[in-house]
Amino acid sequence: MVILGFESSCDETGVAVVCTDRGVLAHALHTQAAMHQAYGGVVPELASRDHIRRIVVLTRQALVDANLKLADVDALAYTAGPGLAGALLVGAGTAQALAWSLGKPAIPIHHLEGHLLSPRLADPRPAFPFVALLVSGGHTQLMRVSGVGDYKLLGETLDDAAGEAFDKTAKLLGLGYPGGPELAALAQSGDAARFDLPRPLLHRPGFDFSFSGLKTAVLNQLQKACKAVGVDAADASVLDTQTRADLAAAAQAAIVDILIAKSVATLDQTGLRRLVVAGGVGANRLLRQRLLDACTKRGVEVFFPPIELCTDNGAMIAYAAAERINAGLCDLSHDQSHAFTVR
Ligand code: KG4
Ligand code: ZN
C-alpha cells in the first residue's frame, strides 16, 4: 500500500510517501525555525498559518519525487497529537479532505509513536522488543516497546523535557531557536569540567528524569561569571566566547549524563538487549557517541533514526501508519465518522 503522511504538530511541515513494502519513497519538509527565531520560540498562530501555506506545495513535491499521482495513494496518515491544536488541524484537515475526495482511509497517528518507530526506517532495523529513549522538545520518556502498538511507559521527565533543557539553556547563553543544535555546536569548543552542574535524580532509584534544576544552576553560574566581569545581570553577551562555550559544554554533558544513566538503568532492570533512541535530541552527537560506548560495553545494541529523521517529519508519520497496517491494527474502511481526530 502507498501511504501519504502529514506532520504539522509544531513548527515543521512534513509530507511523505511511504510504501508498506518498500519504505520511504519520498519526503518533503519545511522548517519554520527561521520564522520563529525572532520570538525565541514557536508562535502558534504563525505556525498554523505557515502550515497552511506550505502543505499543498510539499504534497505536490513529495508525489513528484515519488513519481506517483494522488490516485496512486491507498491511505492517508496524519499526526493527531499531541501538539499545537491549530497546527495539528492543518495536517488533519488536509489528510481528511484528501481521504474523503479519494474514498480512501485516513489514519490518525500519535506523534510519539511516529518518533518511536522511526529508527526502524534505518538499516539495520531494530527488532522488537526494545527499550526506547524518546527525547524531544516536549517529551522525555523511557518505554518498553514489545511490538507495534504495545508500549509501556517506564519513566518520564517530572518537569522539563531534555530538548526543552537544551533550548532554555541555549536561550540563557544568548543562542537562537531551536537551541539544541546551536548549544551543541558551541559546546564543541568548550571545556565541560570548568563548571560543576548538578545531575538531578541521577543516583535515585527509578527511571524518571528532572531537568529544571539544571537550568537554574546554569543561570546561577552565568550570573557569577557576569559578576566576575563587573556586570550585575545574567547577560551572556558580556562574556567571552570561551566562557560561553564552557557553560554550553557543561550543560550538554549534564543532560547527556542523566539520559545515559537512566537508559542504562532501564536496560539493566528490563534485561532487554536493544536500545532505540528517537526524537529531536537523538540528533545530538555527544549523546549518540556516549550511548554507543555505554551500550557496546554492556553488549547492548543501540539504534538511531537517520539523523535527518530525528526531528519532526512526515516520513515517521506515514511509516507508523505502514507499521500499523502491516500489524493489522488499522481500520482501512473509509468510514469518515471519526473525521478530525485531534488528540
Ligand atoms: O522531536 P522534535 O523535532 O520536536 C518535538 O516533537 O518536540 O525535537 C525538537 C527538540 C528541540 O528541543 C531541539 O532543540 C532538540 O530537539 N534538538 C537537539 C539537537 N537537534 C534538535 N538537541 C540537542 N542536540 C541536537 N543536535
Ligand atoms: Zn516530535
Image: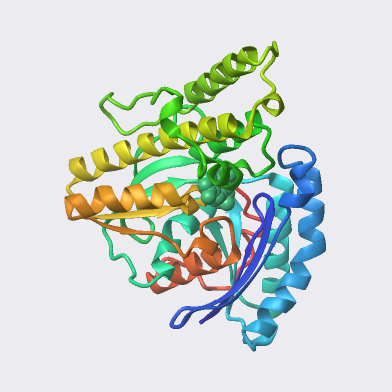
Front position in the image: 325 or 201: 201
Give percent across and percent down for residue 324: 43, 67
Front position in the image: 106 or 316: 316
The reply to whether residue 338 is visible in this rendering is yes
How many numbered discs, if any?
A: 0
Give percent across and percent down for residue 39: 78, 38
Q: How is the image coloured?
A: rainbow
In the visual, does 167 lie left or right of 176?
A: left
- Does residue 320 sit above or below 85 in this rendering? below
In the visual, does 335 lie left or right of 210?
A: right
Q: What residue is shown at x 64% (from left), y 29% (from top)? A: 240
Q: What residue is shown at x 41% (from left), y 29% (from top)? A: 193
- Does residue 5 sit above or below 235 in this rendering? below
Q: What residue is shown at x 33% (from left), y 41% (from top)? A: 260
- Does residue 49 sit above or below 254 in this rendering? below
In the visual, does 195 lie left or right of 308?
A: left
In the visual, does 147 lie left or right of 220?
A: left
Give percent across and percent down for residue 303: 35, 60
The reply to whether residue 272 is visible in this rendering is no
Give percent across and percent down for residue 128: 28, 62
- Does residue 226 sit above or below 335 in this rendering? above
Front position in the image: 230 or 82: 230
Q: What residue is shown at x 67% (from left), y 26% (from top)? A: 236
